[in-house]
């Protein structure tokens, strides 16, 4: 990787992480408040994360293995919030008397 590509690639990788966190937080906030708008904002964040992955795929000089790892991570990020929410919901349900 040349010095000219380092900063844009690092910026896109940072955006990847930020959008993943936004998706998780907005999804959880939407579920807690039963707000479709917050959940929709979470899905928009995930869509932005997918666009960042596409940008990294096409614009960065990362090796193929790293690009595949980013795609796999992006796909995995799509299911983490719903799985975590389901687990927390089951964990905190009151037992029936």
Image (cartoon, grey):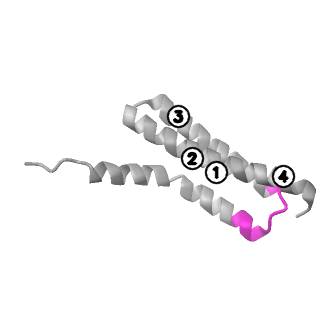
**Depicted 72 relative to depicted 79: above or below:** below
Q: Which residues are magenta?
A: 58-68
Residue 23 in percent (x, y) is at: 55, 43
Residue where numbered disc 1 is placed? 17
- Give the numbered dot on residue 40: 3
Q: Measure the alpha-carbon separation of dots 2 and 3.
A: 15 Å
Q: Nearer the viewer, mark 3 or mark 4?
A: 4
Label 2: few (<14), some (14–19) or many (≥20) C-alpha neighbours in 10 Å: some
Which corner quadrant of the image does residue 4 belong to? bottom right
Residue extending farthest left: 97
Q: Are marks 2 and 4 in contact (CB under 8 Å)?
A: no
Dot 3 or dot 4: first in sequence order is: 4
Lower position in the chain sequence, tag 2 or tag 4? 4
Q: How many marks?
A: 4
Judging from the image, what secondary structure is the residue with disc 3 in? Answer: helix
Q: Residues within 10 Å of mark 4 (few under 14, many from 20)?
A: few
Which sits earlier in the primary sequence, circle 2 or circle 3? 2
Percent across and percent down for residue 58 are: 81, 55
Residue wearing tag 4: 7
Q: Is residue 55 magenta?
A: no
The span from disc 3 to disc 4 (Cα, nearest Å) is 31 Å
Front: mark 3 or 1: 1
Instruction: Decide if residue 22 is on the left or right side of residue 3.
Output: left
Instruction: Please state, as top left, top right, bottom left or bottom right, where the N terminus lies in the image.
Output: bottom right
3D distance between C-alphas at marks 2 and 4: 21 Å
| Left or right, residue 71 beside residue 76 | right
- Which secondary structure lies at badge 2? helix
User: Between residues 1 and 81, which one lies in front from this camera angle?
Assistant: 1
């Amino acid at each position: 990787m040349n010095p000219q590509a380092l900063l844009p690639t690092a910026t896109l990788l940072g955006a990847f992480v930020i959008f993943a966190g936004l998706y998780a937080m907005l999804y959880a906030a939407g579920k807690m408040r039963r707000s479709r708008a917050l959940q929709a904002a979470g899905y928009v964040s995930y869509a932005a994360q997918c666009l960042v992955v596409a940008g990294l795929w096409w614009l960065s000089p990362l090796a193929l293995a790293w690009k595949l790892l980013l795609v796999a991570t992006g796909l995995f990020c799509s299911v983490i919030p719903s799985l975590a929410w389901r687990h927390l919901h089951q964990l905190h349900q009151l037992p029936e008397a």
